[in-house]
Amino acid sequence: MRRSRFFAKVILMGTTINVLAVLGGSRFLWYKTPTTEWEQGALPIGNGRLGGTVWGGANETLTLNENSIWSGPIQDRTPPNALAALPIARELFLAGKITEGGQLVLRNMTPAEQSERQFGYFGNLDFNFGHTNELDNYIRWLDTGRGNSGVDYSYDGVNYT
């Protein structure tokens, strides 16, 4: 009987810790106003190839991008010795020779071309919900653990999520 109580307590503690980790505030960014500047307040979402930013206004703007949109021509920036240097670098790192491995990587695996190109964005997707900026109970958030974001507010007595 004591064993079953012990295991029940362990399971209960594990469940409580798991729920607290999911709802923990440290992985969320919270804002009480929409942003007006892309660089300072738009919330990033995406997977490294496709991405966007959520501005969070009554009339929403999503700034969209994709990783192949760059200025200038396509460039093969892979150094010719990179593939041959990879197994040697791995051996150095596994042997604990971090400095030597890092120097090998810098010499043989980093691109020599220094041509500057600018990243371009795909465009903006605007949603007009017909609401003014007179919003109540406004909150916008980014969940850094799950990679999603949202906006909640009340307008004219109706809650929107």
Image: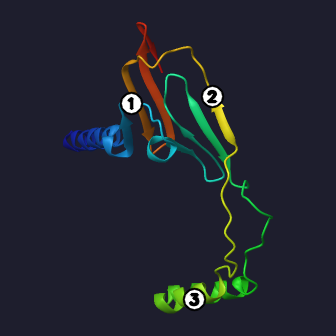
Q: Nearer the viewer, residue 98 or 2?
A: 98
Q: Where is the N terminus found, in terms of image quarters?
A: top left
Residue type at numbered disc 2: Asp
Judge the density around disc 2: few (<14), some (14-19), many (≥20) Cα neighbours within 10 Å.
few
Query: Pointer 3 and pointer 1: residues touching (CB < 8 Å)?
Result: no
Q: What secondary structure is found at the residue carrying circle 3?
A: helix
Seen at 45% across and 20% down, the residue is 133
Q: CA distance from mark 3 to mark 2?
A: 51 Å
| Labelled disc at residue 91 | 3
Judge the density around disc 3: few (<14), some (14-19), many (≥20) Cα neighbours within 10 Å.
few
Q: What secondary structure is found at the residue carrying circle 1?
A: loop
Q: CA distance from mark 3 to mark 1?
A: 51 Å
The residue tagged 2 is: 126
The answer to which quarter of the image holds residue 82 is bottom right
Q: Nearer the viewer, residue 161 or 88?
A: 161
Q: CA distance from mark 2 to mark 1?
A: 18 Å
